Structures are given as C-alpha cells and as structure tokens.
C-alpha cells in the first residue's frame, strides 16, 4: 500500500514536471501573470509599510503638556505623573522640572543676550514645571486632556496645551484614519484584481485541456490522479513566479530606495526588504503556490464530472 | 455478463439516439455491433463505460449497475474495460509510449510491469519505432493503433472497440481483428462496433444489427448485408 502511494506520487510528480517543461509557453505566460500579481502585492505591501511608518512618525510628534502653577510641589506633580501612568491609553509621561525647563530655555536662547539678561535681572526662575504626555493612539488625547482638566487638579494645573492644539490634532487624526482605511481598501481591491487575472489565465489553460482531462477519466484515472500533476505544476509556477519577482524586485528597490530616503529621512525600504527577506519571500511563494494550485483545482472541477 | 435493460437515450432536447434496447452479452463472447451511421452504436458503447448516462433503463456489468456508480467508484469499473474510441481520444501531450503506459499507470501497475508490457504492446500494434512520437506526429492509422494498444495493455476483462479499423489498410485491419480474436480467446469479452461488412461476414460470430436506435436483428452466427 505504502509502495503504491509512493509510485503514484512519483508518477504524478514526473507528469507535472513534464507538462511544466513541455508547455513552456503556457508556463511562461502563467508565471508572467503571477509575477505581475506578486510584484503588485509586494509593492502594495512595501508601500503600506512606508506610509505606515510616515504615519507613525507623525503620530509620535504629537504630545500634550500640562503646566503646573509655581506653587505646586514636586511631590504633588510626581503623584499626578504616577496616576497618569496608570491610565492604559497613556504611553509615556515625562517630568520636566522648573530647573530643567530653565536650562532648556537658556540653551535655546543662548544667542539672544537680551533675553538672557532680562532673565538674570528677574533673579527668580519664572518657568513652570510640566508633564509631557504621549498617548498610545492619537484619539486618546481628548480623554487625557479632560482627565487633567477635572476639578481635582484645578488647584495645581495652570494650563493644558491640548486646547490650543486640539484642531490640529483632530484634523491629523482624521487624515491618518482616512489614509489608513483608503490605503487598505485600495490594496485589497488591487490585490483582488491581480488575483482574478491570474485565476483567469489558469482557467483558460485548464479550459484548453478539458478534453484531455475527460480522456483521463475515461481510461480509468481517479480524480486525484488527474489533479496531481496540476498541483505539482501549480507549485512550480508559484515558486518560479516568486523567484522571478524577487530577482526583478530587489535591484529596483536598491535603485529607488535612496531616492525615497532623500525625501523621507528614516525610511529605508531596501533595508526593510533585506531584513525581512525570508518572511517576504516565504509569503510571496505561499501566495503564488496557493494561487497556482487553488486556481487549477477550482477551474478543473467541472471537467472531472465525466 | 453485460446487460442492457430497457435502455433509452435521448440527447437534449429531443434526439432519440437509443430506444428501449435490451441486450445480454455473455462473458467471453465476441459480438459485432453493426448498423448504418447514426444508428446509435457509439452511444450504446459510451453508456457502457459511463461516459453518458442512459435517459431510461439500466446497464449492468457483472453485478454492478453502471449508472449507480459514483465518481470515486467509476474509475475502478473503467479499468476493467478497455476502450478503443471512435475518435481515438489520445492524450496530445503524451507520446505513443506514454499514452499506452498511462492506462497501466492509472490502474496502479508497477513500473517494472509497465516497462515490460508497453514495448510488447507497441510491437504488437506495429509501432515499436514510433514509441516516442506525439499523436500529432502520427498518421491516422498509427493513432488508431496507439488507441488499440492503450485499450488492451492492461488486459481488460471487457474490450470495447468502436470502429477500430476505420483508418487502417486491409492488412492492418486483419491484424487488428486477429488481435481482438486472440484477446477473446484469452478470455476477454469483445464488443466490436463496425461498418465493415467484410470483417463481420468473415468472423462468423454474433452480430447485432441496429437501426435508428433500435436493435433490429441479433444473430448468433450473423452476416451483415447491406
Ligand atoms: N452528444 C450528442 N448530442 C446530440 N446528439 C447526439 C450526440 N451524440 C450522438 N448524437 C446523435 O445520436 C445519434 C446516434 O449517434 P451515434 O454516435 O451513437 O451513432 P453511430 O451508430 O455510432 O454512428 P457512426 O457509425 O457514424 O459512428 C446520431 O443521430 C447522432 O447525431
Ligand atoms: Mg459511432
């Protein structure tokens, strides 16, 4: 029994390899369409990585600060800090003491002797201590701001700078949401179209072989024996397409990546591709093989009914 | 034993190809199926291997009813029947050798047996030097002989030959007929559909005459006169 299965697997594999070579043109056409599909999907994926990192970058630039009245003690501020840190929406809280604020102010204005001089004349540190808060999501700032504006803290808190920035933050939040959603929809739609084109190419191939499939049935082949070589061919097509896509893709990335980096510092697509090479290649191959095999199986279903 | 029970076939929408056919063919019998073009010979044979389902009636081979077989069971039935199709039905992407080997492969014969039997069958049908040609590289008669080789290579219990000599010259024709007789002697049931009255008249075996989808004559030692 085990020998039988091995013999059958052998035959099916051989037949699949044979038809892969003998139908060079059909194989080439199928692989080409798959390369376009995989290339498109990979590009969309990398694009979404780029856009994602731009968006995250923007998001990280957003924060809010609370300024405490000069009469507030450091202990009280640190208590507020630890309370803030317990809120799950809060990513990080940074305490800036009055001295730190002053030092920062001085370095920022060291070239402006007028300001430095007037500070010296004042004799006392006029700057307030503050907490600098980053939220996990841009939509969380509203609730954090309201928390800080509650009456509990009204004796300590001077200002929360959220209100000044509220319009900008809300606008940014809505733009980010739109870009993310429409990007996802566009990716899915384009990916779907590419998959359909591949499926259709394979369907045409199977259609041209419908009589052969019928003949195999009539001389006593079981359905799996007929499907076997098509599965092998589908795997080969997927593998080849994935390889070709990588071979075409990588040089293009290496060429384009510095140009993108010039615009958007901190984004290195070629590096990202290199670092995630195996994951990307594996996923590409998986998609290719899956497309090749499943399309064949679906397309040939009706011709196996004899 | 093959039993056609009240079999009718209507091709949609209303082409009556067979009308109430009743036939019993005993095992190891040699039967010629004759009749003019369009009489329904091929249709009858197609139903025997489940290529077409009867519109009415039942076909029993051995102890199984062909039309009750499902997709998984059908191939096992077909492996017991060797068929020479009127239009050959060779696999265009396989060579003569591979076409013949295919019938053995699907039946799960082992490689050694295939390597032994296929060349034998190729020389039996006179194609040992065309083993590696594809069907499009063969003449009509050569294709027909590949089809015959494929039908008999796995030594089927039943051999169904639909016009197997249509494209052959007289010498080849008689070689093929003698081959069929030989197989019959070795124990196979043979059903031969043909137009060729010279074959039928020389065989002196059972002849079933069909006309317009009906069996009109069934002689044990028949002649086919037109
Ligand atoms: N798939 C089909 N659809 C519709 N009509 C068909 C189909 N196949 C055959 N027929 C019709 O059924 C009738 C019987 O056809 P069949 O092929 O059985 O004849 P035959 O006796 O084998 O003829 P020949 O000697 O020419 O091969 C013919 O009139 C044919 O036109
Ligand atoms: Mg016919």
Image (cartoon, rainbow, N blue to C red):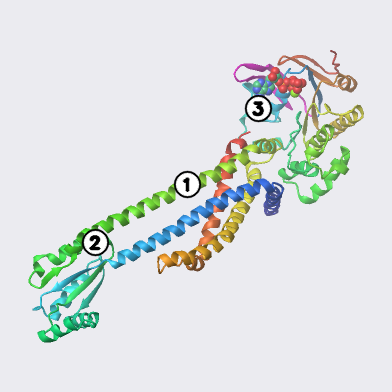
Q: CA distance from mark 1 to mark 3?
A: 39 Å
Could you tell me which residue is drawn at 52 percent across and 65 percent down? A254
- Does residue B3 belong to the magenta stretch? yes
Sequence-earlier tag: 2 or 1: 2
Direction from residue B111 to residue A153 in the image, left or right: left
Q: Residues within 10 Å of mark 2 (few under 14, many from 20)?
A: some
Q: Which residue is mark 2?
A: A140
Observer-side mark, 2 or 3, equals 2
- In the picture, which quadrant includes the C terminus of chain B? top right
Q: Chain of mark 1?
A: A
The boundaries of the magenta stretch are B1-27
Could you tell me how far apart the alpha carbons at marks 2 and 1 are, in whole angstroms? 34 Å
* Front in this rendered view, residue A146 or A12: A146
Ligand 1 picture quarter: top right
Where disc 1 sits, the SS reads helix
Side (left or right) of B79 relative to A241: right
Camera-side residue: A66 or A86? A66
- Position of residue B207 measured from the top left corner of the image (x, y, whole percent): 82, 19
In the depicted view, which residue is nearer to us: A254 or A4? A254
Would you name the residue on which mark 3 appears? Answer: B52
Residue A222 pos. (x, y %): 65, 41
Look at mark 1 in the image and give the residue it sits on. A192
Q: Is mark 3 within 8 Å of ligand 1?
A: yes
Helix, strand or loop at disc 2? Answer: helix
């Amino acid at each position: 029994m085990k020998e039988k299965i091995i013999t059958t697997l052998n035959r099916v594999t051989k037949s699949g390899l044979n038809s892969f070579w003998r139908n060079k043109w059909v194989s080439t056409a199928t692989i080409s369409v798959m390369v376009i599909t995989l290339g498109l999907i990979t590009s969309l994926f990398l694009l979404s990585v780029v856009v994602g990192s731009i968006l995250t970058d923007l998001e990280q630039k957003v924060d809010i600060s609370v300024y405490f009245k000069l009469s507030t003690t450091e202990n009280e501020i640190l208590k507020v800090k630890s309370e803030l840190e317990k809120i799950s929406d809060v990513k990080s809280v940074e305490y800036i003491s009055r001295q730190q604020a002053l030092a920062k102010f001085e370095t920022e204005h060291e070239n402006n002797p007028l300001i430095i001089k007037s500070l010296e004349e004042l004799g006392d540190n006029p700057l307030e201590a503050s907490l600098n808060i980053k939220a996990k999501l841009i939509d969380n700032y509203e609730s954090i701001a309201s928390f800080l504006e509650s009456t509990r803290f009204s004796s300590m808190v001077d200002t929360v700078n959220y209100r000044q920035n509220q319009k900008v933050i809300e606008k940014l939040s809505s733009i980010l949401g739109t870009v993310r959603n429409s990007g996802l929809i566009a990716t899915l739609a384009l990916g779907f179209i590419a998959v359909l084109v591949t499926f259709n190419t394979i369907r045409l191939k199977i259609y041209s072989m419908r009589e052969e499939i019928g003949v195999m049935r009539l001389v006593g082949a079981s359905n799996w024996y007929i499907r076997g070589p098509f599965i092998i061919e589908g795997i080969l097509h997927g593998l080849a397409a994935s390889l070709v896509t990588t071979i075409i893709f990588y040089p293009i990335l290496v060429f384009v990546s510095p140009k993108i980096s010039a615009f958007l510092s901190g984004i290195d697509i070629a590096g990202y591709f290199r670092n995630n090479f195996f994951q990307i290649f594996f996923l590409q191959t998986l998609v290719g093989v899956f497309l090749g095999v499943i399309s064949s199986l679906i397309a040939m279903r009706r011709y196996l009914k004899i | 034993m093959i039993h056609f029970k009240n079999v009718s076939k209507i091709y949609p929408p209303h082409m009556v190809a067979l009308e109430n056919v009743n036939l019993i063919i005993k095992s190891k019998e040699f039967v010629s199926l004759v009749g003019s073009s369009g009489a329904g010979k091929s249709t009858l044979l197609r139903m025997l291997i489940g290529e077409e389902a009867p519109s009415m009636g039942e076909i029993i081979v051995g102890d199984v009813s062909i039309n009750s077989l499902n997709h998984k069971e059908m191939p096992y039935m077909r492996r017991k029947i060797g068929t020479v199709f009127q239009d050959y039905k060779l696999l265009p992407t396989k060579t003569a050798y591979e076409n013949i080997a295919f019938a053995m492969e699907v039946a799960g014969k082992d490689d050694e047996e295939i390597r032994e039997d296929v060349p034998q069958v190729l020389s039996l049908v006179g194609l040992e030097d065309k083993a590696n040609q594809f069907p499009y590289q063969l003449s009509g008669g050569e294709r027909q002989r590949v089809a015959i080789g494929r039908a008999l290579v796995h030594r089927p219990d039943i051999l169904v030959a639909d016009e197997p000599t249509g494209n052959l010259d007289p010498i080849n024709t008689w070689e093929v007929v003698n081959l069929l007789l030989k197989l019959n002697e070795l124990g196979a049931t043979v059903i031969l559909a043909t137009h060729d009255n010279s074959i039928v008249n020389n065989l002196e075996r059972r002849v079933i005459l069909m006309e317009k989808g009906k069996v009109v004559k069934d002689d044990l030692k028949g002649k086919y006169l037109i």
